[in-house]
Image (tube, helix red, strand yellow):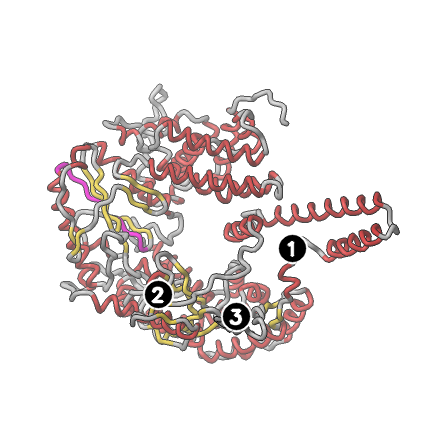
Amino acid sequence: MIIIIINYPNKIPKPPLVYTRIYSETNIGRFYDQLDSCNWNNILDTHYTELAFDKFYSKFTDIYENSFPLTVKSRSKRNNKPWMTKGLIKTCHTKSLMYKQYLKGQVSKIMYTQYRDAQKIFIRMAEENYYKDLFNKDLNGIKIMWKEIGTILNPKRGKSRAKIKKIDTKKGDFATSDQDIASIFNEHFTNIGNQLSNDLPSPKKHHKDFLKNPQENTFFFKPYTPNEIEKILKKLPKKKAPGMDNISNKAVQLAAPFIKKSLCHIVNLSISQGIFPSKLKMAKIIPIYKKGKHDLCSNYRPISLLSVFHKIIETCMKHRIKDFLKRYNILYTYQYGFRENHSTNYALLDVVEEIYKYLDNKMHGIGIFLDLQKAFDTISHKILIDKLEYYGIRGTILEWFKSYLTDRKQFTCINLTKSSELQVTCGVPQGSVLGPLLFILYVNDMENSFSAIKPRIFADDTSLFIFDQNIDTLYSKTNQELKYLEDWLLANKLSLNIGIDKETRYILFTHSKRNRANKLPNLNMMNANLPQAKSVRYLGITLDEQLSFHEHTKLVKERIRNYNGIIYHIRNKLSIYQLRQIYYAFIHSYIIYGVEIYGNAITRNLCSTLQIEQNRVLRTILRKDRYTPIDYLHSTLKILKIKDLIDFRILQTIYLALKFPEYLPQSITEIIESNPHTHNTRNKNPLRTYQTNTKYGNRTYKSTKSINWNNMPIHIQNADSIQSFKRLYTIWKLDSYKPTIFIPS
């Protein structure tokens, strides 16, 4: 006989309590009263940054916690459907009571069924109105919309968050307790930058060797006014997670009229004295999973949750610095990241147009796509300070940045458990306001490392493009340029992810199929060969060696098909208006991204396959069968066809280049040339057109796309704003869809 003894716990552990702060009218009124009665004058009379901020922070925190105390969120409220108001819940109780009375014969069946049916209608209307507001992408972010779609498809989704259960200690075992996991993550994030820089070989050059001509002009800080501070506070995103002090952006926005003078005084004091408040230098780190094994620290990205006041001071400095950089044209021309009127679309357009130009001239090209290793975490503070001084940030402002970067600390939070605090000695916080700007200044001098090429950069995504008529010469030139880049990387303590399974790789662009089949020389960097790829995912678009965009088009097709399945499952819960909003948020946004690039190159058959998938989605939204005319679908929902979307994005760029070039990067305006010929002849057109040699040349903006612009109605070309252009073009195309006699079912 075998006896098995199983020890069950005496009590099932209760789920953790959920705390929240309730922003009721009563609490907000109490908040306003306390802010109004508070004496803020002693802060204005304090002329030392640390002391002034400590006084302000203490006052504001006390008022905030008194007005919005942490309250346990009841489980019944957590499980309620958000559209179920108190009145609707009361009708549910009434319906249950009537049902019991009906069973006892106290209420007739007709009376009960009439009440039940009416209640269903009211609940359905409340649900529709709730989702109508929710699926308004102008009011709510796409993340919120996607979360709610997931809830509709799977009501249990999101009730239990995925927890990090174990992590590799690199000692042959795994840490399983929350405290140990948090400590391992914190040590990893704190030390990774120094470890990577220590593993690099000794540089052959100094980082100052690449800083050629220092900026003659010096940045001078223009003090802020209370009204400027108030505008900044009003623009704070409401949905962002708070820092370690748990003060929400919403509370600061509510308090804006009362605290704007105090915050203005602190901001001006901080920057003029070169001191960043030490109380704000603590970051709460949340590991965000990227890809790969879940038990490796290297597969997580550290996101810094910083105090809202930290971000306010950063934002004030960022605005002034950006004005200075723009005024003196300091940023690298081909840096497309974190800049006004620059985007990934324009970066891609610039890259593809250049490749087309050289291939049309029967030249070969190599595109190298670099993956910097832990780029934001490995920035050397000393080198960054040297570069800021080089670019004109000197004196007290430079001291402010030194204060901002030094003596920073962080702790990591895992499953509500905190690690100990550790000091951060390199890198810029991911999640900070100034971090991206500091990074693009750090890599701004990369162009000085090359002899004959101009790298294309979007934040830490860097690509190099080299061209030549001879393949062997092309590889020789490329290897030489890679040596120059290696010197710059080592001097700046940056490293690359190189290997077969890494993201750094290259593509050979050539018009000759024979060259693709031949054995080619190696490209070498940092004692490793760069792997050659047939396609690369670059800034959200898949580039292949023939620039056919077949692979990317298949991805778009799959995406449309997948979302069509989602819309099909939720179509009975939402109105046509709401489904159309979902289409624009998830399908249209995916189609339109880079469509002027991949759509300009794909064949007619590929374009037709995308059109077929789009038509299926529109039928699902309108609940129509396959016999419904296509023009009826598009005109009813006022959605353009794929071919018209391609032309729309191309013509929109041309419109901006001709009418508002200041809204485009300089590199894009140079692609499009207006026609200097003004004589009233048959060749008089707004855009100059060029003869091309190959199919690659036909895809450029200087060829057939110029013809498309010249053939567009003149009243659309002369639209007085980009909004008017979009509206007039859409009306023109929708009117062109053939009217069909169709009786909707």
Estimate the x, y position of residue 518 in percent, counting from the top left.
14, 37
Disc assigned to residue 683: none
Mark 2 / mark 3, whichever is N-terminal: 3
Q: Is residue 619 left or right of residue 509?
A: right
Residue at the image position 55 percent from the left and 60 percent from the top: 159
The residue under label 2 is 297
Q: Quadrant of the C terminus?
A: top right
Tell me the SS state at disc 3: loop
Residue at the image position 83 percent from the left and 51 percent from the top: 103
Mark 1 / mark 2, whichever is N-terminal: 1
Disc 1 packing (10 Å; few <14; some 14–19; many ≥20): few
Q: Are marks 3 and 1 in contact (CB under 8 Å)?
A: no
Count every numbered label the image shows and give the total.
3
Front residue of 350/293: it is 293
**Three-letter amino acid code of the residue under disc 3:** Asn
Mark 3 / mark 1, whichever is N-terminal: 1
Disc assigned to residue 246: 3
**Three-letter amino acid code of the residue under disc 2:** Cys
Tell me the SS state at disc 1: loop
Mark-to-mark CA distance, 1 and 2: 38 Å
Q: Main secondary structure of the magenta part?
A: strand
Q: Which residues are magenta?
A: 460-470
Tell me the SS state at disc 2: helix
Magenta includes 467?
yes
The residue under label 1 is 81
Residue at the image position 41 percent from the left and 39 percent from the top: 556
**Three-letter amino acid code of the residue under disc 1:** Lys
Estimate the x, y position of residue 229 in percent, counting from the top left.
51, 64
